[in-house]
Image: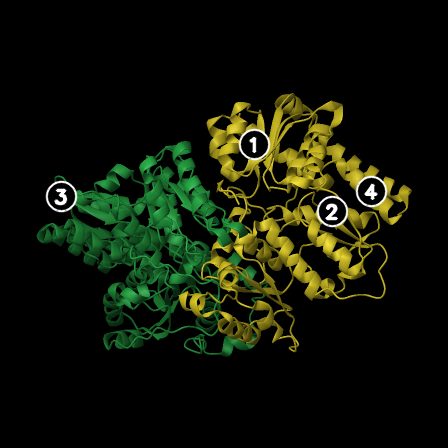
């Protein structure tokens, strides 16, 4: 892979840990060097708005802490001992062994060590997620596939109008919990039950996750291979829709309703009520809008989800001018055109320049050539934005100058948060 | 696959060089007794949790060197601490009135292709690009578990491209698997910096170089400067928040001492050998007695033993009334101290003076060099206490919190949140905290008083938190897993 200035994600191990920490009473057993668990934990917690996620997060995560002797002689005995002592000491519903670079490079046979514990009453599973396999996004997919292969059970009967949500990477999206809860709320309103939401799912729910009608992949980039694997293995089809923000949410809800054959009238009524709620607040915002936002050209530096959702909301609902969209999560070449289409197919033939770039220097080279009036990015973009006098709202990883707990930007209610936060930034930099 | 290349340029691990241990649980008395008999054993744990590795200090510290670009020759996750460092950097620069500058870092982002075919080409590209982009005075290159195991010859790559690169390139060898002791990383970092330090021109005869870790912030430096200036000693801080030309001239001082003897241990020995700079490494100047100790050792380096006595006498008299007042408010309280041992023991000395009983004191690692003298001193001044040595290991903290039920945690980022979850209020020692010297003793004493006044958050949390351990664990010996197997 190519070098990158100012990383905007952690590694595959970080992504796998994020997924594990999002599961209720799940504990990772990290088979990696001594610092991996802590570095990723300190890093991810602090850089995703200071939220400490997980049942056994950070310095509470069991870890083999492989040293030189394990690198030379192999780490399998140490892993075996660690699994055994973890089962003895830690009370969990899921014990998730996840291996990092050292184990990956020396070729420890994780599968065979873990299989020795298959007779236990506790559920012990594994994932191989060495950092060199990719970013947080890829690690999330690797670990998700382990859930599909090792936890989810075949079902004989599907539960009608039930769905799973996937694709939002915990902590990599600092506002993951708020984003998920808004979507869960809306799906509930149109009569759907969410089995796996991606936030605090129990192992019981994961086991029966194949019994749903539909998987909803809330990302244009992340989780595609997991959703495909889920379909192949358990015949659950999936629908892909990038995280909707603002009135785009209506389209999302209609598409889901169509796919599942829900009562159209009922869905339309929900959308009407939700839009009424949204616009009630945006009407109140008219004066402020006239004062601070009219004619503003905006740029977004973020992952596929935020770039698509926010560009569409700020252009189609809020009437701003899209100038630049920087997609930072390196989607594969084969899906870039589709992503670009979602970013540029906007009202009134407006469209921003779109670049796919993860390197901060190159991103800022691009921004400074044609600076917008307002930027949405990460905390790491702030110093450069300050130099160019561009107000910046940080919403993406690394996010270390804000606290992110329950807030989200998705759906109807989240879009109001986005308006308020943009307003705060513009007013405080006036 | 395990093709380990060991370079002579690599610093020895703390375990090899100082017989550092990372696993001990017992009384302070027992630790001293065993240490003096030379029978402290290297032990491991049959159950362990995520710890800190030797890569942390090089990456975090070198990221904060003025103008530096830090290149992590690693998969992208090894840079995950840098957002936190950006924050510390901002804070540190702000407190020193320095212009705000972003931490500059590049990850070589090693992927599957690189671990098979080698990553040095990407590293060379990254270094050249860093030089062009930022024109930095230095570029530090951090190695990682992955680059070490695949056998990337970082030194050879650096030597190849250095002639065409303006910046001085400093490779820092700090593969995480090489040592269970975090401080090995300090050695790797400072060993690297020694390469840019030049032969002294003229010595500044009244100046001491003082090594200061990033966790001891500006107000503490001001206090030390205040005390040393009284006897005509100037201070040159090293190695953070100073520019490279000051680092290059570090050898021009008349002597060297430290606010963290755990950090400076290797550096001083190499520094003295190479540049003939005498050094002293007393415990951290926290609390009255250890500040006296520190000042006497520092003054002695420049032959000012007599002059410093007057300062000490004046300061004692000056702070006594206020200290007594704080003491009354803290009478009978019990504390748990959670830092690296050098800091823990010095804070414990202050707590003795504030009338607080220390039930447990922790260290992330132990070595006689910085541990034995302060431990012996404390042994004579307070009732026996438990010493916990572990590279983090939360399950042992949780057991000890539950067992000892301290009134307050004196700790930092590592233990703070965990103590709150178990209902223990925290008197944090963080990069903003003032706690060294005589003024720091008063300031931090008042912090503790305040921390005890409204424990609502800790108490509320404790009612709602379920920690991941089986309930039987809390009635077990907290050190049960030490020395058991450890494959």
Q: What chain does mark 1 sit on?
A: A
| Image location (x, y in percent) of residue B208 | 18, 46
Q: Is residue A406 left or right of residue A197?
A: left
Q: Which residue is mark 4?
A: A255
Within-10-Å neighbours for mark 4: few <14, some 14–19, many 20+:
some
Q: How far is mark 4 from mark 3, CA to CA?
A: 77 Å
Q: Earlier in the sequence, mark 2 or mark 1?
A: 2
Q: Is residue B383 left or right of residue B311?
A: right
In front of the other: A393 or B172: B172
The residue under the point 43% across, 48% down is B73
Any mark on residue A425, and which?
Answer: 1
| Image location (x, y in percent) of residue B275 | 16, 49
In front of the other: B181 or B139: B139
Q: Nearer the viewer, mark 1 or mark 4?
A: 4
> Looking at the image, can residue A91 be seen?
no
| Image location (x, y in percent) of residue A91 | 59, 71
Any mark on residue A183, and which?
Answer: 2
Query: How many numbered marks are there?
Result: 4
> Looking at the image, can residue A235 be seen?
yes
Q: How far is mark 4 from mark 2, CA to CA?
A: 14 Å
Q: How far is mark 3 from mark 2, CA to CA?
A: 67 Å
Within-10-Å neighbours for mark 2: few <14, some 14–19, many 20+:
many
User: Which lettered chain is shown in yellow?
Assistant: A
- Asked if the residues shown at circle 2 and circle 1 are in contact, with their CB atoms under 8 angstroms apart, the answer is no
Q: Nearer the viewer, mark 4 or mark 3?
A: 4
Q: Which residue is mark 3?
A: B206
Q: What chain does mark 4 sit on?
A: A
Q: Quarter of the image holding residue B162?
A: top left
In front of the other: A272 or A6: A6
């Amino acid at each position: 892979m190519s070098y990158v200035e100012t990383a905007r994600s952690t590694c595959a191990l970080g992504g796998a840990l994020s997924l594990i920490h999002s599961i209720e009473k799940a504990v990772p057993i990290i088979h990696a060097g001594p610092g991996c668990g802590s570095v990723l934990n300190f890093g991810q917690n602090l850089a995703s708005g200071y939220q400490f996620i997980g049942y056994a997060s950070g310095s509470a995560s069991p870890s083999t802490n492989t040293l030189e002797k394990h690198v030379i002689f192999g780490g399998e005995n140490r892993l075996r001992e660690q699994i055994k002592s973890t089962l003895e000491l830690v009370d969990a519903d899921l014990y998730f062994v996840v291996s990092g670079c050292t184990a990956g490079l020396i070729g420890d046979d994780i599968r065979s060590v873990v299989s020795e514990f298959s007779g236990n009453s506790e559920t012990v599973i594994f994932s191989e997620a060495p950092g060199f396999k990719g970013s947080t996004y890829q690690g999330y997919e690797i670990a998700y596939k382990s859930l599909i292969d090792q936890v989810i059970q075949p079902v004989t009967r599907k539960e009608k109008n039930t769905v799973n949500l996937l694709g939002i990477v915990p902590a990599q999206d600092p506002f993951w919990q708020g984003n998920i809860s808004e979507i869960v709320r809306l799906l509930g309103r149109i009569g759907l039950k969410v089995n796996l939401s991606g936030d605090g799912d129990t192992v019981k729910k994961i086991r029966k996750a194949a019994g749903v009608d539909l998987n909803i992949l809330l990302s244009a980039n992340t989780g595609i291979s997991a959703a495909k694997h889920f379909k192949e293995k358990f015949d659950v089809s999936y629908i892909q829709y990038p995280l909707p923000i603002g009135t785009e949410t209506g389209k999302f809800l209609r598409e889901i309703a169509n796919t599942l054959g829900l009562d159209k009238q009922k869905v339309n009524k929900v959308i009407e009520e939700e839009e009424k709620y949204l616009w009630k607040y945006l009407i109140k915002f008219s004066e402020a809008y006239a004062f601070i936002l009219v004619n503003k050209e905006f740029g977004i530096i973020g992952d596929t989800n935020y770039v698509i959702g926010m560009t569409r909301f700020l252009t189609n609902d809020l009437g701003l001018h899209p100038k630049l969209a920087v997609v930072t999560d390196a989607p594969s070449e084969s899906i870039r055109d589709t992503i670009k289409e979602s970013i540029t197919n906007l009202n009134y033939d407006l469209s921003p320049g779109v670049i796919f770039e993860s390197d901060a220097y190159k991103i800022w080279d691009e921004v400074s050539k044609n600076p917008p009036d307002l930027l949405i990015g990460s905390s790491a973009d702030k110093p450069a934005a300050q130099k160019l006098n561009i107000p910046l709202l940080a919403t993406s990883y690394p996010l270390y100058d804000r606290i992110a707990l329950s807030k989200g930007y998705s759906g109807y209610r989240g879009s109001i948060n986005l308006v308020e936060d943009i307003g705060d930034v513009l007013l405080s930099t006036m | 696959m395990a093709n380990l290349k060991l370079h002579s340029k690599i610093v020895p691990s703390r375990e090899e060089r100082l017989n550092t241990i990372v696993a001990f649980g017992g009384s302070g008395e027992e630790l001293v007794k065993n240490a003096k008999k030379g029978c402290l054993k290297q032990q491991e744990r049959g159950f362990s949790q995520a710890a800190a590795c030797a890569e942390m200090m090089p990456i975090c510290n070198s990221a904060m060197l003025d103008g530096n670009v830090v290149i992590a020759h690693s998969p992208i996750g090894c840079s995950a601490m840098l957002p936190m460092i950006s924050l510390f950097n901002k804070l540190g620069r702000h407190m020193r009135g320095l212009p705000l500058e972003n931490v500059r870092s590049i990850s070589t982002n090693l992927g599957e292709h690189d671990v098979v075919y080698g990553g040095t080409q990407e590293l060379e590209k990254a270094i050249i690009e860093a030089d062009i982009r930022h024109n930095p005075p230095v570029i530090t290159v951090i190695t990682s578990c992955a680059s070490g195991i695949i056998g990337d010859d970082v030194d050879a790559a650096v030597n190849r491209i250095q002639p065409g690169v303006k910046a001085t390139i400093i490779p820092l060898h700090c593969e995480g698997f090489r040592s269970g002791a975090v401080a090995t990383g300090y050695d790797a970092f400072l060993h690297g910096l020694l390469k840019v330090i030049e032969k002294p021109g003229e010595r500044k005869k009244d100046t001491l170089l003082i090594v200061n870790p990033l966790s001891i912030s500006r107000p503490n430096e001001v206090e030390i400067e205040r005390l040393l200036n009284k006897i005509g000693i100037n201070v040159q801080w090293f190695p953070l928040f100073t520019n490279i030309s000051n680092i290059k001239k570090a050898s021009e001082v008349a002597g060297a001492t430290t606010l963290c003897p755990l950090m400076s241990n290797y550096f001083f020995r190499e520094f003295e050998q190479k540049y003939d700079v005498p050094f002293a490494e007393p415990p951290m100047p926290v609390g009255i007695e250890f500040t006296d100790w520190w000042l006497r050792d520092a003054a002695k380096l420049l032959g000012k033993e007599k002059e410093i006595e007057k300062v000490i006498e004046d300061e004692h008299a000056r702070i006594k009334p206020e200290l007594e007042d704080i003491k009354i408010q803290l009478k009978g309280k019990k504390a748990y101290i959670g830092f690296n041992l050098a800091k823990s023991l010095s804070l414990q000395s202050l707590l003795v003076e504030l009338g607080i009983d220390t039930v447990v004191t922790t260290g992330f690692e132990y070595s006689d060099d910085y541990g034995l003298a302060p431990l012996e001193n404390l042994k004579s001044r307070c009732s026996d206490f438990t010493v916990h040595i572990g590279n983090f290991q939360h399950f042992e903290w949780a057991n000890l919190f539950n067992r000892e039920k301290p009134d307050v945690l004196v700790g930092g980022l590592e233990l703070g949140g965990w103590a709150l979850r178990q209902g223990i209020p925290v008197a944090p020692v963080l990069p903003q905290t003032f706690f060294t010297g005589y003024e720091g003793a008063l300031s931090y004493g008042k912090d503790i008083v305040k921390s005890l006044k409204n424990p609502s958050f800790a108490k509320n949390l404790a009612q709602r938190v379920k920690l991941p351990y089986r309930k039987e664990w809390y009635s077990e010996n907290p050190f049960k897993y030490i020395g058991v197997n450890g494959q």
